[in-house]
Amino acid sequence: MKKGILLHETADDVGVAVMDLKKGEEVGVVTLEGQSVRQIALVTDVPLGHKVAMQPLAPKQHVSEYGRAIGYASAPIAAGEHVHVHNIKSLRWAASATNLLEK
């Protein structure tokens, strides 16, 4: 089985595709140190460098990467689904927009 997803921290909600991934493929998930974590079936195509959900995520649920919250789900996200601007909102930009409006 090919290793196609990299996790920064084993508890992260999303991993990063290290190659173009296709719907229906089952790929291995590994840590930065090369430790095998699990296998996951892709439910959508995921381009190289994009995020992949490691577990189902509900709307408004925080999404973790690098061991910390990076955003929140803006729509239901299935395990193995492409995670990008269509289904996640960044906490960084949300905080920046709020700060700008308050000034």
Image (cartoon, grey):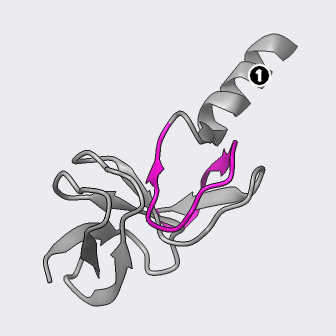
Q: Position of residue 70 (x, y in %)?
A: 58, 50
Q: Is residue 71 magenta?
A: yes
**Position of the C terminus by quadrant:** top right
Residue under the point 37% across and 69% down: 8
| Segment tinted magenta in the rendering | 66-84
Q: Which residue is mark 1?
A: 99
**In the image: residue 24, left or right of residue 82:** left
Q: Residues within 10 Å of mark 1 (few under 14, many from 20)?
A: few
Q: Position of residue 97 (x, y in %)?
A: 71, 20
Secondary structure of the residue carrying tag 1 is: helix
Q: Quadrant of residue 102?
A: top right
Question: Furthest residue to the right?
Answer: 102
Towards the viewer: 79 or 69: 79
| Residue 103 seen anywhere in this rendered image of the structure | no
Q: Quadrant of residue 57?
A: bottom right
**Position of the N terminus by quadrant:** bottom left
Residue under the point 77% across and 22% down: 99
Q: Is residue 48 magenta?
A: no
Above or below, comparing residue 64 to residue 72 in the picture: below
Above or below, comparing residue 97 to residue 7 in the picture: above
Residue under the point 68% across and 53% down: 76
Residue under the point 22% across and 81% down: 33
Q: Position of residue 77 (x, y in %)?
A: 60, 56
| Residue 57 seen anywhere in this rendered image of the structure | yes
Q: Position of residue 94 (x, y in %)?
A: 70, 30
Q: Amino acid at mark 1?
A: Asn
Q: What number of labels is visible?
A: 1
Above or below, comparing residue 7 to residue 78 in the picture: below
